[in-house]
């Protein structure tokens, strides 16, 4: 359920664990400030294709917190190496409008796109400096709204690092449906060709892991690398909620991710 924040704009409801995800985003943006400094004369862009409204409220406590685009913007300011531009998109136009307003209020230069990630990704890429330095955060609710084509297109940009939220919960909860011969096609969007590469007769946790590994292999085939250090965030019952996967071509970016991943007591290496 959405609530109105004090600025009169919507805030979406989230679980307390969202703060883990935000912490990783905050830390990576902060720790990569040196790379942005080296690109000062060009553009350094933050891209958020599932940006949400820019503010959320925590179900368990009622506390209001910043959402990903505002976190990225504020974190980039820490060492004075701000993104030159923030590109946001979301399937909900009211969320995009709210996030844009909130970013502008804090002084950000924003370009906004309304629509589903697969529909806007080409426009977003066309708006990027091909020689710039870019960082995209992909934070969908579920696997069906994270088509591989979006990752493929973003990864075709020369200097594009990605932090991707993969819903482990979705894979767990709906695996029995996905593996049915005529089941929902969400996984076909997420990891095209998975049926030819995963033996669905194995134990469910193995199938889950095999699908995830197949998806990582698809990313590798694009000429970029998913880091082996996968951040796992669990709920209070110790079930995996999601995996955070960092993807880059650049060894230094991987080093930075490894230094900040897995720092909370709750998380562990995959
Ligand atoms: C987990 S929330 C994003 C939260 C935000 N990244 C943050 O941390 O504050 C997922 C967002 O994806 C949006 N969404 C759902 N389906 C989408 C799609 N196919 N393409 C783009 N956005 C979508 C929802 O409206 C929602 O705002």
Image: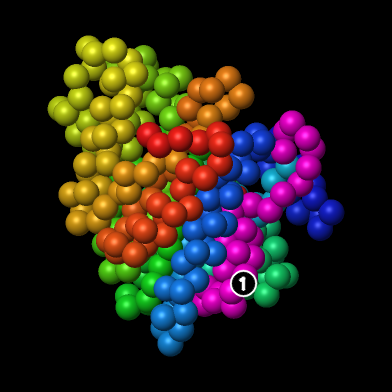
Q: Secondary structure at mark 1?
A: helix
Q: Is residue 12 above or below residue 247?
A: above
Rendered view: 143 above or below 175: below
Q: Is residue 182 above or below residue 244?
A: above
**Residue that extends furthest to the right in the rendered view of this protein:** 6
Q: Which residue is mark 1?
A: 77
Between 257 and 70, the one lying in front of the other is 257
Label 1, residues with CA under 10 Å away: few <14, some 14-19, many ≥20: some
**Residue 112, visible in the rendered structure:** no
| Residue 158 in view | yes
- The image position of residue 89, as x and y in percent, is 52, 57
Is residue 179 left or right of 142 when viewed as pictured?
Answer: left
Indicate yes or no whether the magenta region holds residue 20.
no
Name the quadrant of the N terminus.
top right
In this view of the protein, which residue sits in the foreground, 116 or 132?
132
Residue 229 percent across, percent down from the top left: 37, 44
- Viewed as shown, does residue 63 lie left or right of 192? right
Picture coordinates of residue 177, whole percent (x, y): 37, 17
Outermost residue to the bottom: 41
Snapshot quadrant of residue 81 = bottom right
Identified at 20% across, 25% down, the residue is 198
The stretch of residues the image draws in magenta is 58-85
Q: Is residue 52 above or below residue 157?
A: above
Quadrant in which the C terminus appears: top left
Residue at 25 percent of width and 47 percent of height? 219
Q: What colouring method underlies this structural image?
A: rainbow
Residue 167: which quarter of the image? top left
Q: Is residue 84 magenta?
A: yes
Q: Position of residue 224 (x, y in %)?
A: 25, 56
């Amino acid at each position: 359920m959405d609530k109105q924040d004090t600025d009169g704009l919507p805030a979406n409801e989230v679980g307390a664990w969202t703060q883990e995800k935000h912490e990783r985003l905050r830390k990576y943006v902060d720790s990569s400030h040196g790379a942005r400094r080296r690109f000062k004369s060009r553009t350094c862009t933050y891209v958020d294709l599932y940006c949400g409204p820019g503010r959320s409220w925590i179900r368990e406590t009622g506390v209001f917190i910043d959402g990903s685009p505002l976190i990225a913007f504020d974190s980039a300011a820490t060492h004075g190496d701000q993104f030159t531009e923030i590109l946001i998109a979301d399937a909900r136009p009211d969320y995009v409008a709210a996030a844009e307003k909130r970013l502008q209020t804090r002084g950000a230069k924003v370009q906004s796109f309304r629509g589903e990630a697969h529909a806007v990704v080409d426009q977003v890429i066309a708006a990027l400096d091909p020689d710039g330095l870019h960082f995209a955060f992909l934070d969908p609710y579920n696997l069906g709204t994270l088509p591989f084509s979006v990752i493929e297109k973003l990864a075709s940009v020369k200097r594009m690092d990605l932090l991707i939220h993969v819903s482990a919960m979705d894979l767990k909860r709906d695996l029995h449906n996905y593996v049915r011969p005529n089941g929902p096609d969400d996984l076909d969007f997420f990891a095209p060709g998975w049926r030819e590469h995963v033996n669905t007769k194995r134990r469910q946790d193995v199938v889950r892991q095999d699908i995830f590994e197949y998806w990582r292999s698809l990313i590798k085939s694009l000429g970029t690398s998913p880091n082996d250090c996968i951040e796992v965030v669990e709920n209070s019952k110790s079930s995996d909620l999601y995996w955070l996967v960092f993807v880059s071509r650049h060894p230094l970016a991987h080093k930075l991710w490894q230094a900040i991943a897995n720092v909370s007591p709750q998380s562990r290496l995959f």
